[in-house]
Image (cartoon, rainbow, N blue to C red):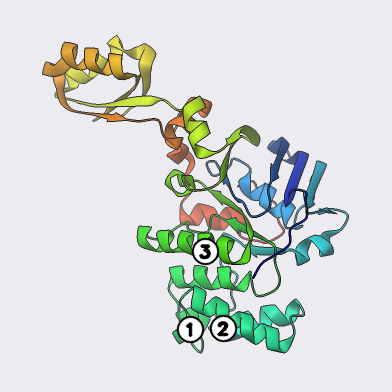
């Protein structure tokens, strides 16, 4: 299906701020998402990603600033904005008592999709997410990965132009996460859908068109992954010293280059010349050494001074944070 896009951006965010009591979740955030783009918001839990997504899908109002879905202001024209959106929330939102088919059919009815088109779309989406043979099974009988695939299918039963995905692969195994991303890319190609996805899995955004790095409610950098790595990434030297004494000695001597360390490993910023000199001078103290080329993880380290995984939440934490749709979210 070929979709005619308007000449403007699919999503425009200008100076959006949101506060919960003393906590500033979003601090004058601004960016644009182009039509037919896969755009990632990358940041740890607590960075403000989910607050922004809830504003875009009209469940929260910004304290200041403007957010547009196409030409529609999400605060002033929420119904028009919603009609253009397909949303997959981080927390499950299927009706487990209904079958897979009934969940999709109900969503189509709510959005007023005509019966013939609704059946056609349901068949198409079930085939895409490989759930055709499960159509008559209750949704509660699906695995976590299958439920997530069903939620993605449901978001596209109506004529949604923009797909908002909030941590769509959190808690899933690596194989299922890879499959989910293959569906996302296929949807973009086949339906010209614009995709905005939030995540704290760095490896997932390598193939996105652009990545927006956020932390503490601020946009720290936004560009293509390759450009971010070139402008902000660092070559890293991962070192496993032989003894505790060697560990302490290396960490002290190269404190100016120290990115982080644990009881087994030291990570230093590096370049080719430094790596060669380090090995020549410290080879006798090292059990293992590896060179890591500039990556999005090193981009995040450079911009924030810490590992993105510092703030990954447990399932219990996520339940507390996102337990009630439309409530106060800071994720």
**Circle 2 Cα neighbour tier, 10 Å, few/some/many (<14 / 14–19 / ≥20):** some
Helix, strand, or loop for circle 1?
helix
According to the picture, the residue beneath numbered tag 2 turns out to be 123
Name which quarter of the figure residue 222 lies in.
top right
Whole-percent x, y for residue 164 in the image: 64, 58
The residues tagged by marks 2 and 3 sit, at their Cα atoms, a distance apart of 16 Å
Query: Is 328 positioned to the left or the right of 255 in the image?
Result: right
Does 77 sit above or below residue 292?
below
Q: Whole-percent x and y of residue 16?
A: 76, 40
Residue 26 percent across, percent down from the top left = 70, 39
Q: Between disc 2 and disc 3, whose residue precedes?
A: 2
Q: Residue furthest right?
A: 76
Residue drawn at the location 16% of the way across and 22% of the way down? 286
Q: Look at the picture and state if 254 lies above or below 75.
A: above
Q: Quadrant of the N terminus?
A: bottom right
**Residue at 48% over, 28% down:** 230
Q: CA distance from mark 3 to mark 1?
A: 17 Å
**Mark 3 or 1: the one toward you:** 3
Q: Are marks 2 and 3 in contact (CB under 8 Å)?
A: no
The 10 Å Cα crowd at callout 3, few under 14, some 14 to 19, many 20 or more, is some
Instruction: Give 6 or 250, whichever is nearer the viewer.
Output: 6
Q: Are marks 1 and 2 in contact (CB under 8 Å)?
A: yes
Is residue 198 toward the left or the right of residue 238 in the image? Answer: right
Give the residue number, with chain letter if any, for mark 3: 186
Residue at the disc numbered 1: 132
Marks 1 and 2, the one that precedes in the sequence? 2
């Amino acid at each position: 299906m070929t979709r005619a896009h308007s000449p403007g951006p699919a999503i425009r965010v200008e100076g959006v701020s949101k506060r919960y009591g003393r906590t500033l979740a979003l601090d004058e955030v601004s960016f644009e998402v182009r039509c037919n783009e896969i755009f990632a918001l990358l940041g740890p839990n607590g960075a403000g990603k989910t607050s922004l997504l809830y504003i875009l899908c009209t469940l929260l109002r910004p304290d200041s600033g403007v957010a547009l879905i196409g030409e529609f202001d999400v605060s002033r024209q929420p119904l028009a904005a919603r009609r253009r959106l397909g949303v997959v929330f981080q927390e499950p939102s299927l009706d487990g008592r209904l079958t897979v088919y009934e969940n999709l059919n109900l969503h189509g009815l709510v959005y007023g999709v005509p019966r013939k088109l609704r059946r056609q779309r349901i068949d198409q989406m079930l085939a895409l997410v490989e759930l055709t043979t499960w159509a008559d099974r209750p949704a509660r009988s699906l695995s976590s990965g299958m439920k997530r695939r069903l939620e993605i299918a449901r978001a596209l039963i109506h004529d949604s132009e923009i797909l908002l995905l909030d941590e769509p692969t959190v808690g899933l195994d690596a194989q299922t996460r890879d499959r989910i991303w293959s569906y996302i890319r296929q949807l973009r190609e086949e339906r010209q859908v614009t995709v905005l996805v939030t995540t704290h899995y760095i490896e997932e955004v390598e193939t996105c068109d652009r990545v927006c790095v956020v932390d503490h409610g601020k946009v720290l950098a936004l560009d293509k992954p390759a450009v971010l790595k070139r402008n902000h990434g660092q070559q890293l030297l991962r070192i496993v010293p032989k003894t505790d004494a060697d560990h302490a000695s290396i960490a002290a001597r190269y404190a100016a280059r120290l990115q982080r360390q644990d009881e087994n490993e030291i990570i230093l910023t590096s370049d080719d010349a430094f790596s060669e000199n380090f090995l020549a001078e410290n080879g006798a103290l090292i059990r293992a050494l590896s060179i890591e080329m500039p990556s999005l993880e090193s981009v995040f380290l450079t911009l924030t001074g810490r590992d993105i995984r510092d703030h990954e939440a447990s399932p219990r934490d996520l339940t507390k944070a996102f337990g009630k749709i439309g409530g106060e979210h800071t994720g």
